[in-house]
Amino acid sequence: MTAPLRREPPWSEGSTPAHAVRLRRLNRWQAETLREDLADLYVESSRAQAGQEYRGREAFLRRLTGDIRRAGFALLIAEDTAFAGCAYGFPVPREGTWWRGFDGPLPQSVEQLTVSGHVFAITEIVVHPHTDDQGLARRLQQRLLADHHASLGATLVDQADALACDTFLSWGWQDIGAVRRPSDPTVLRSPALVLLRALVLPLGQRSAAHPDGLAHENRTQRPD
């Protein structure tokens, strides 16, 4: 996951989001139609070094194009007078191919939820730095997972991006290990591997049997 994130203030039940920012789901056709606009949002929101914007934009478009083709792809946009952010992802395939490159055995509870088809991967979250909604990235993530009745959220974060890692952990995500992947999996013979952290967000109720919340629940079941 390569989306730039910023540290957000702690959320509380009494917090009121910026109501001017609306969340809206897009279907595949709409996402395809808005590819260039979403790429512009990514460039405006990224921390790319001068001269690297074009390369980052093209890499984002390749990732987006690849994900749009996946079964169950879903995209949320946040908008006020213009695009303020977006988040997208897809259900993790039951055969577990999304976890390729994981260092060591996958935790049993995560493997079981994957096989049962109740894990949703968030592959990108982008928030424009000038939005007034300070909790927008978290709100996008929560809405995307809720819409898909997932029992477990999953994402990959570049280990070198300490800000993104810390932000996800502050939202309740758990670090379950390392994943090694090509720096750009959309390019054949990518020259280098990057070290990613595999993060999961349990959405089940905590109990004595499952204190970490890593259990499937009927109420969060993703329809087959």
Image: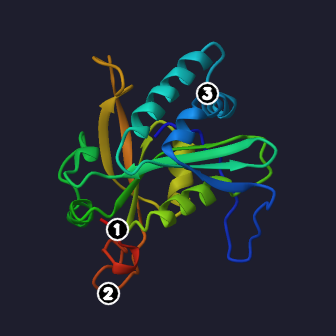
Query: In this orientation, does residue 180 appear?
Result: yes
- Spot occupied by residue 133 in the image (x, y as percentages of width and height): 76, 54
**What secondary structure is found at the residue carrying circle 1?**
loop
Mark closest to the chain's N terminus, 3 or 1: 3
Figure quadrant of the C terminus: bottom left
Does 213 sit above or below residue 208? above
Alpha carbons under labels 2 and 1: distance apart: 27 Å
Q: How many marks?
A: 3
Query: In this orientation, does residue 172 appear?
Result: no
Residue 36 badge: 3
Q: Residue at x 69, y 30 (%)?
A: 44
List the residue tagged with mark 1. 223
Q: Is 154 situated left or right of 18 in this image?
A: left
List the residue tagged with mark 2. 208
Q: Residue at x 50, y 66 (%)?
A: 146
Depth check: give the residue in front, 155 or 81. 81
- Spot occupied by residue 162 in the image (x, y as percentages of width and height): 52, 42
- Spot occupied by residue 194 in the image (x, y as percentages of width and height): 36, 30
Mark closest to the chain's N terminus, 3 or 2: 3
Q: Residue at x 38, y 38 (%)?
A: 69
- Which quadrant of the figure has residue 15? bottom right
**What secondary structure is found at the residue carrying circle 3?**
helix
Report the residue that reaches farthest toward the top.
51
Residue type at tag 1: Pro
Q: Nearer the viewer, mark 2 or mark 1?
A: 1
Mark closest to the chain's N terminus, 2 or 1: 2
Alpha carbons under labels 3 and 1: distance apart: 32 Å
Residue type at tag 3: Glu
Residue type at tag 2: Ala
**Label 2 neighbourhood size at 10 Å, few (<14), some (14-19), many (20+)?**
few
